[in-house]
Amino acid sequence: MIKLLRKIHTLLYFAAVLLFFIPFYPILYFFTRQPQKYYKQIVWCRKWISIMAIHLVGIRFKVTYEDNIDWSRPFVICPNHTSILDITVLTYLCPQPFSFMGKIELLKNPVTRIFFKSIDIPVDRKSKMSSFRAYKKADEYLKEGKSIVIFPEGRINDIYPPKLSEFKSGSFRLAIDNKVCILPIVIQDAWKVLWDDGQKYGSRPGTIHIKVLKPIDTQTLTQGEFDDLQNYVYNKMNEHWTQE
């Protein structure tokens, strides 16, 4: 019975996303014809589509901060990744416009496609050329003062219950290249509400707890030190993840 209710809740969640996406679509279609001009407006639409959908199905967020965040500056934002709800977490959390870097398969999703064709950065991790183009686009955005969200694990792990997987190097190289801070974010229990895409275990109403850790300065770091930075961020995030 519980499994059936969780499956029904997942269907209601996706229905809620469509409920708000459909009326926004004509506006988004207009904005995405000129994504550079209407970048902030596209981000705003995405934020409210996702937030209204999760509130409708009884999902809430509770955020704690390790330090004050100056949202006027760009960051390479590094959250862990256990749920499709992580995208909504970031849209809820960040008051500044930002772009996601995500898997190329998101271009096939009818909702995420419009964003990944305009303001976000799709990447095929099996293709070195695709990875290079994605890196250059992210570099361009950072130089324009926009933040980039990169899930350093690269994907949602197949292990359940999840653990913090090994990090990829791209986000740390990008931060050092542009001398911007890494902003680690630990999304502690989104997987308990909806793991992965919800197909296996469904979902339920609940509160997702988020810890925004202190930004990590890269001003004095060189590319030769990205391994140390990567390991430091992993250990720091894993410490908070295991305190769940």
Image (cartoon, grey):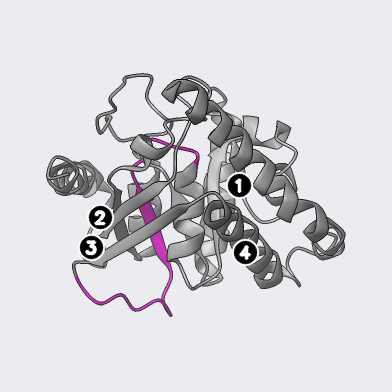
Q: Is 184 left or right of 135, judged from the image as shown?
A: left
The image shows residue 82 at horizontal and vertical percentages of 38, 35
**Would you name the residue on which mark 2 appears?**
222
| Element type where label 2 sits in the image | loop
Q: Are marks 3 and 2 in contact (CB under 8 Å)?
A: no
Amino acid beneath label 2:
Thr
Task: Rate crowding at label 4 as few (under 14), some (14 to 19) or many (20 or more) other CA atoms within 10 Å.
Answer: some
* Horizontal and vertical percent position of residue 236: 15, 49
Instruction: Name the residue at 25% across, 55% down.
Output: 222
Q: What residue type is labelled 1?
A: Ile
Find disc 4 in the rendering and name its residue: 48
Secondary structure at badge 4 equals helix
* N-term mark: 3 or 2: 3
Q: How far apart are marks 3 and 1 (CA)?
A: 23 Å
Name the spot of residue 55 as percent of width and height, x first: 53, 57
Residue 234, compared with residue 175, is above or below; it is above
* Mark 1 surroundings: few (<14), some (14-19) or many (≥20) residues within 10 A: many
Near-viewer residue (31 or 223): 31
Real-space Cα separation, disc 4 to disc 3, in angstroms: 29 Å
State yes or no: discs 1 and 4 in contact (Cβ < 8 Å).
no
Considering the whole magenta stretch, tell me its main secondary structure.
loop
Q: What stretch is highlighted in magenta?
A: 67-84
